[in-house]
Image (spheres, rainbow, N blue to C red):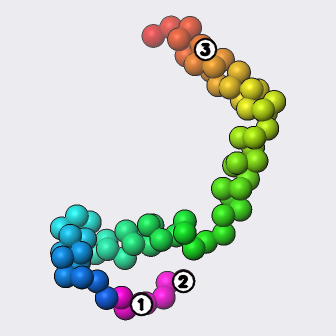
Amino acid sequence: MHKRMTITLDEAVYEGLYRTVGKRRISQFIEDLVRPHVLDTSLDDGYRAMAADKEREAEAREWSNALVKDMFDEAR
C-alpha cells in the first residue's frame, strides 16, 4: 500500500528531478533512494554473514569457476 506525502524541494532540485527522471517517475526515484536507509537491514546482515563464511565462499567460487570453464568447453 502506498501513502501520499507532500514534501518541499528547492525549485532547482525539482527541475533537475523532472528533467532527469521525468514527471511520473519522481516518487519511485525518491523511494528507491530512501528505502535502504529506512527499512530493516537484516538482508544486508545476512549477506555479510555469508561473505564472512570463508569455507562457503571458497565452495561458491569453485562452483562458479567450474561453470565458466564448462561454458568455454561448450561447442559453439
Q: Viewer-nearest of labels 3 and 1?
A: 1
Residue 48: image location, x then y, percent: 70, 48
Image quadrant where residue 21 sits: bottom left
Amino acid type of disc 1?
Answer: Met
Residue 58: image location, x then y, percent: 74, 26
- Gap between marks 2 and 1, in whole Å? 13 Å
Q: Is residue 72 left or right of residue 21?
A: right
Amino acid type of disc 3?
Answer: Asp
Q: Is residue 30 left or right of residue 38?
A: left
| Residue at disc 3, secondary structure | helix
Residue 55 seen in the figure: yes
| Residue at disc 2, secondary structure | loop
Q: Which mark is residue 70?
A: 3
Residue highlighted by disc 2 = 1
Label whose residue precedes the other's in the sequence (3 or 1): 1
Image height check: is 58 above or below 3?
above
- Gap between marks 3 and 2, in whole Å? 45 Å
Residue 38: image location, x then y, percent: 57, 73
Name the image quarter holding the N terminus: bottom right
Q: Which mark is residue 67?
A: none
Q: Which mark is residue 5?
A: 1
Taking the spot 22% from the left edge, 64% from the top edge, the residue there is 20
